[in-house]
Image: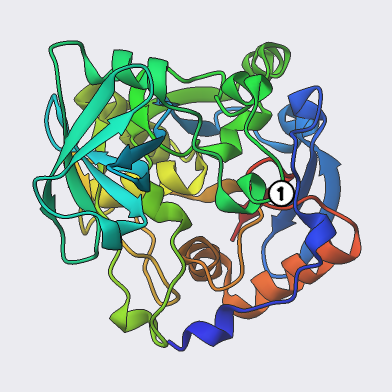
Amino acid sequence: MRVDLFDFELPPERIALRPASPRDSSRLLVALGPESLDDRIVRELPQILRAGDVLVFNDTRVIPAQLEGTRGEAKIGATLHKRIDLRRWQAFIRNAKRLREGDRIAFPHKVAAIAEARHPDGSFTLAFEGDEPVETLLERAGRMPLPPYIAGKRPTDERDKSDYQTIFAREDGAVAAPTAALHFTPELLDSLDAAGIVRETLTLHVGAGTFLPVKAEDTADHAMHAEWGRVDRATADRLNAARAAGNRVIAVGTTSLRLLESAANADGIICPFQGDTSIFITPGYNFRAIDGLMTNFHLPKSTLFMLVSALMGLERMQQIYAHAIDKDYRFYSYGDSSLLIP
């Protein structure tokens, strides 16, 4: 499909630069079926969902994956994307023209890495020096990797260290938050439990590729960056049992959805999964593992807007987004949410 079909006009003031406080006070646009639209609040989820529904969360934790350093006189920016092994990460590089294979990049607080190999997409493998765990080095020298549409409007600060983590975050490795889950609070979880709504977690370490623009003119020519994920057997078994009993599985966030769809076989059975996924979901895709999606509002012409258009239909999503813009919903990572049930 043509990428420009997924474009829309978004007023810049709709981009949220801070999350709502409290988190569950965010607005929630509920889209059920082909026509219904309802303006609600996230904390009303227990009244909107049905007992037995299963919400599937991503428990990845964002690491301080953005680094500023030097190679000689040249300033080099690095955003880690995907772990390769204990000391090596694939990273997107700013000012990459000044970097060659074998160069040493010096970061603050005596942290350094060697640019070992350049990848075809222009990224590099960075091998961090020393014996300390890379996570320890990043805590010293790195900062939270806020999306460019936020970082371009204000500096990262101490608040972002907590604001940009979900309540479920426990598995280190993401360089972008699974933002749909940013809206959940302990009080909301208690209310969901009382309403008989089930929670499951999986892990997908979101990479920096999630923010890269689609440069191709046709979706068939766009290549997704791989991300590592895991669904364990016990979780897969419970999800399959829930669907067999007639209950809905609702992914909280496109990251949870993409991993569930990667783990599902042709018969819609969710299997244990551990490894990389580069699944790219566009209109025409046959969903196998999920019955709905809770997600924030996404960028024009992004792979995530393509995904929600695959779930609901492009014309329907254009209607939903036009409503959201007209009603002053807040967009992107720190913005409001939607519940999409086809």
On the image, the x and y values in percent for residue 243 come to: 40, 40
Name the one closer to the observer, 175 or 129: 129
On the image, the x and y values in percent for residue 290 come to: 43, 49
On the image, the x and y values in percent for residue 326 come to: 89, 66
Name the one closer to the observer, 140 or 189: 140
Quadrant where the image shows the C terminus? bottom right
Q: Which residue is mark 1?
A: 153
The quadrant in which residue 233 appears is top left
Left or right: residue 144 versus residue 317 is left
Quadrant where the image shows the N terminus? bottom left
Left or right: residue 237 versus residue 159 is left
Residue 299 in view of the camera: yes
Residue name at image x 64 percent, y 19 percent: 158
Residue 278 in view of the camera: no
Residue name at image x 34 percent, y 64 percent: 280
* Tag 1 secondary structure: loop
Q: How is the image coloured?
A: rainbow
Name the one closer to the observer, 275 or 154: 154
Residue name at image x 40 percent, y 22 percent: 141
Residue 322 in the image: above or below residue 156: below
Label 1: few (<14), some (14–19) or many (≥20) C-alpha neighbours in 10 Å:
few
On the image, the x and y values in percent for residue 230 come to: 24, 33
